[in-house]
Amino acid sequence: MSLKLILFDFYKTLGFDICKVDPKEFFTFYQKLGIDLSDKEKFQKFNILFGKVIGYTKNWLECCQELLKGLGMPDFEKAKTLADFYQKNLSYQLYDDVKEIFDLPFQKAVLTAQARFLIEHLGLDKIAKIFTPKETKFLKPDPRAFLVPLKEFGIKPEETVMVGDEVERDLIPAKNLGMEVILIDRENKIENPSVKKISSLKELKNLLI
């Protein structure tokens, strides 16, 4: 059956984050707000909570309110202070090779854990339909997250290819549903993967056409 849809991950596939300050300054700032990340377990809990919250929110303030609530320390003023800090110091940008996918003769969608407000300025919606957790109601690797774009487009898994940088979160669930999968490994960190691999989106055309 012929390919009809390319489903892209966003982070480290189409775009990346830009931090304007040293990561250590984030920890210092968290401490000033009373957020305790003093050991590995607390740090991991914070990261997991952040990942669960961010994709469902409409702006940094709402995200930070939900984050602090999840940490058991709801405080509007602290949430506003944290939101302002994120707003000033964290942003996202597209990789230069994203332009290589513009003219590919297939429908395109982005399935991401990122919030829409973080990436909407990038113009991806001009070439692809974006699905965040707010639309899918599920986070990857939950297979139900992958099924939402397919239902929206009226396309079968075997008519779809998933392109992502994480084997466990992006590719295995998609493959189990019957999709073709392609790993993008920009830094060549994964040796001998069990799936097709590219290092740049420039290579995608040759695999698909």
Image (spheres, rainbow, N blue to C red):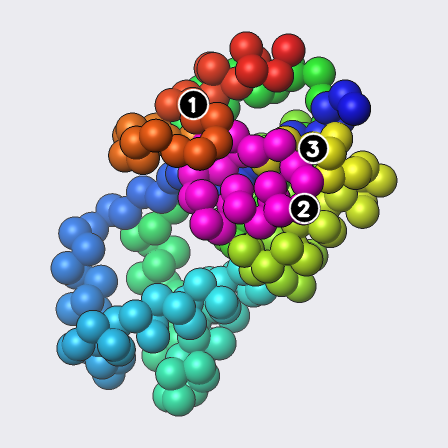
State which tag comes first along the sequence, 3 or 2: 3
Residue 160 is labelled as: 3
Q: Note whether 199 is above or below 48 in the view shown.
A: above
Disc 2 residue crowd, few under 14, some 14–19, many 20+, Cα 10 Å = some
Give the CA distance from mark 3 to mark 2: 10 Å
SS of the residue at dot 2?
A: loop
Q: Which mark is residue 177?
A: 2
3D distance between C-alphas at marks 3 and 1: 17 Å
Q: Position of residue 82 (x, y in %)?
A: 34, 69
User: x and y percent of residue 120 in the render?
Assistant: 57, 43
Above/below status of 169 relative to 159: below
Look at mark 1 in the image and give the residue it sits on.
198
Residue at x 76%, y 43% (from the top left corner): 150
- What's the residue type where badge 1 is placed? Ile
The reply, left or right, for residue 176 in relation to residue 16 is right
Magenta segment: 163-183
Q: Is residue 81 visible?
A: no
Would you say 99 lies left or right of 151 here? left
> Label 3 crowding class (10 Å Cα cut-off): few <14, some 14-19, many 20+?
many
Kind of residue at disc 3: Thr
Front residue of 88/55: it is 55
Q: Is residue 159 visible?
A: yes
Query: For the residues carrying marks 2 and 1, which lies nearer the camera in this image?
Result: 2
Q: Secondary structure at mark 1?
A: strand
166 within the magenta span: yes
Other-residue count near label 1 (Cα within 10 Å), few / some / many at <14 / 14–19 / ≥20: some
Q: Amino acid at mark 2?
A: Leu
Q: Residue at x 20, y 72 (%)?
A: 40
